[in-house]
């Protein structure tokens, strides 16, 4: 394997800030160009109102949305991949279909509450 075919994916730990959910993911994920790659994230305290979200951030840019899902499988197009959230929703795996050097970035796993307060009403 040459240096040009090795890609390092950096995963950010979002669960370290005060919030309801504790999110854990690996800090680094080495990958081989042209192969698929699994990025895993655990969140055992997820609530029924929260969706799983993945973002990626390139150097000197803000985070970009990749994919979101509640339970099941959800496709992403940029980058090409699949988010799998099992029925118990305590973890998830985002699989990059075919890693390229253009995928080298920081990847964030996050949770978002699907219920919003709007005035006196709750909106979901």
Image (tube, rainbow, N blue to C red):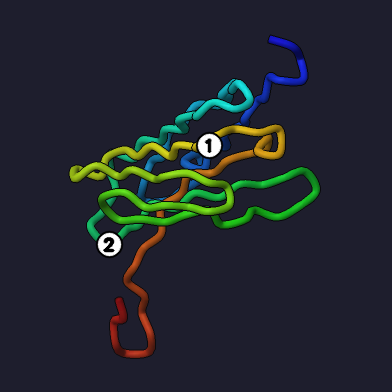
Residue furthest out toward the bottom: 120
Position of 71 with respect to 98 (left or right) is left
Q: State the SS at label 1.
A: loop
The residue that disc 2 covers is: 49
Residue at x 27%, y 40% (from the top left corner): 90
In this rendered view, identify the residue nearer to me: 8 or 34. 34
Residue at x 70%, y 20% (from the top left corner): 5
Residue furthest out toward the right: 60
The residue that disc 1 covers is: 13
Q: State the SS at label 2.
A: loop
The spot of residue 108 in percent (x, y) is 54, 44
Position of 66 with respect to 38 (left or right) is right
Q: Residues within 10 Å of mark 2 (few under 14, many from 20)?
A: few
The quadrant in which the C terminus is found is bottom left
Residue at x 52%, y 43% (from the top left corner): 14
Would you say the residues marked 1 and 2 are in contact, meaning their CB atoms lie under 8 Å apart? no
């Amino acid at each position: 394997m040459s240096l040009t075919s090795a890609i390092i994916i950096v995963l950010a730990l979002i669960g370290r800030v005060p919030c309801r959910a504790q999110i854990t993911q690996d800090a680094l994920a080495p990958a081989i160009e042209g192969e698929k790659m699994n990025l895993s994230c655990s969140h055992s305290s997820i609530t029924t109102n929260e969706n799983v979200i993945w973002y990626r951030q390139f150097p000197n840019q803000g985070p970009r949305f990749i994919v979101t899902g509640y339970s099941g499988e959800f496709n992403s197009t940029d980058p090409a991949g699949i988010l799998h959230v099992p029925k118990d929703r305590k973890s998830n795996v985002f699989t990059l279909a075919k890693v390229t050097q253009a995928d080298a970035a920081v990847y964030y796993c996050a949770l978002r509450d699907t219920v919003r307060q709007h005035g006196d009403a709750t909106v979901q």
